Amino acid sequence: VKSAQTTMALSQRLPRSGNIRHRLLNGRRASLLTLTFCIPFVAIISFWQHFRMMSRLDARLEQAAETFSKNSHEMILSESKRDGIYPASSMGSDFDSPAEDELENNTSHDSHFSHLQTLVYETSGSIIPIDLSINHLKLIHRAPGRPPAPPLSPFASNATISEDFLPVVRTIELIFRWRYSAKTNSRVKDAKQITAYQVIVRRYNDCADCNDHRDLIIAWDSGKVDIPHDEDFPSSVKWSPGEINANNTPHNSSPHPGEIFLWKVILWDMASRPHSSLSWSKFAIGPNDDSEWRGNWITHPLDMHTFHVSSSTNDEKILDECELWHKRRSLPLFRALLSAETLTTVLDGDDDFVTSALLVISGLGSYRVSIDGVPLSSSGPIDPPFTDYSKRVMYRGFDVTSFITNQQPIRNKDIEQSHVIGVTVASGWWDHRPLNSGLIRFDLLPRGPVTIVAQLYITTSKGSVHTVIPTEGTAMKEFWQVSKGPIRESDLFTGEIVDLGVLSAMEGWDTFESWIEI
């Protein structure tokens, strides 16, 4: 009886299970129909909204690009007027054109010069050169994360430095590099490939009225270099002085240490339309080897006796190094006087205008440079970058033209203002606190007194370069003064200790008003 009842109960449940399965199938069909029609509908609406948003964004970007291009063109024209460069269509009343006899005597040169300036300001092409660099070094106007400017002394100069990092390279490292991008709303077939390029280098001229030697403005012109369709675009272009380019121009001179240059690049697209970089990029030429460093390494006299250690065992050497390290505290300050008489003597016989001034400096230990109370090193006390000091030491260069000329045309006979260069030093990667640890090999840590070397290059409108602060003779050594400064201790690992009382008492130490003859 139980078996029969169980069989009857199971037979009664079968239709119920079938009904449930039927309802599930119908629900799945409804879900599939909903997905089939709703997803494409939602996708179409989303695509339509995205298309409207992108259309509005393109219109705004195009309007912003036109405004930026107009402002950049006006800025470049103002630069050309300041530096004595005349675009082909600017020989009217808005620009001071050269004398007529000069144009007659340099007809062929001015013809190329006018054509060159037309190319320099050309923006009709579809390919824009960007990220100009010299040997992978890029001009940085304002470094990201730049610390705030410190308060200046009341006697500090009103001049400022125009960039946070100036690329300084040797003559053998003059390699021009750049990237490029397509212009907004350009045709794909026009921006597909670069068909030609041209590199133009001109001497930096911070003097607005120094137009006596226009033929020396252009330092090098590669001419238009065509690129065959079956060849790739070159990754770099090297300065080749002395070569005659396609335009047969004489502007191919060798650069000299201390000179400052500006350069541009022009690219041609598939439609043979040129487009130049929107602004001039700056770089400088530094000393090529030790023979071109006329300055000597200088240090504090009290630190000279801490160079050598005579102990034999490692433990005794560590103890002696600790004692010598403590003797080198506090860290010194260096300053040099550039008197008007000194500058006049160095420029004796050269009556041309001063067009640029380059200060190069290096040191064992980190340094911060200032001139007339205005700091030049904005990147903090980590100059120079870390290297193997047994093989090489890096140096940096600063464009100090505005300080030397006071932003006015100045000749040898017109120099009346004196200047003071100040150098604040710290340990940096050099002369760490002696550590006795099994994890650190003491003999591999570089140490010794902090020391610096510096010299100044002044270039005139004829291209003559003069060196100041050589410190190689007895007459020049009196320009440098050194004193123990407010920094008691400075280490990348253990921090920095500053005596605020000494810091306050030495305010304005790097200005001419605080200079005291010893």
Image (spheres, rainbow, N blue to C red):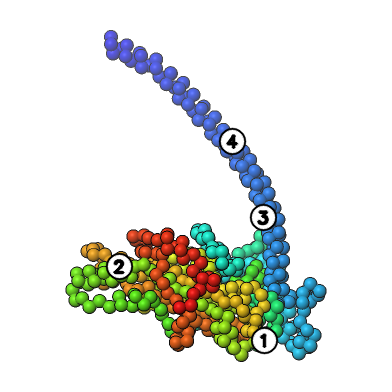
Q: Which residue is mark 1?
A: 249
Where residue 448 appears, x then y in whole percent?
A: 33, 73
First reached walking from the N terminus: tag 3 or tag 4? 4
Amino acid at dot 3? Leu
Q: Which residue is mark 2?
A: 326
Between the residue at mark 2 and the residue at mark 1, the CA separation in whole angstroms equals 62 Å
In this view, the mark in front (4 or 2)? 2
Q: Which residue is mark 3?
A: 61
Name of the residue lying farthest toward the top = 1
* Residue 200 visible at all: no
First reached walking from the N terminus: tag 2 or tag 3? 3
**Going 53% across and 78% down the picture, which residue do you hit?**
338
Please give left or right for residue 113 compared with residue 458 in the image. Answer: right
The disc placed on residue 38 is 4
* Residue 8 visible at all: yes
In this view, the mark in front (2 or 3)? 2
**Going 30% across and 75% down the picture, which residue do you hit?**
306
User: Based on the displayed image, in which of its 4 quarters is residue 7 positioned?
Assistant: top left
First reached walking from the N terminus: tag 1 or tag 3? 3
Check if mark 3's residue and mark 4's residue have beta carbons within 8 Å.
no
Where residue 374 appears, x then y in whole percent?
A: 54, 67
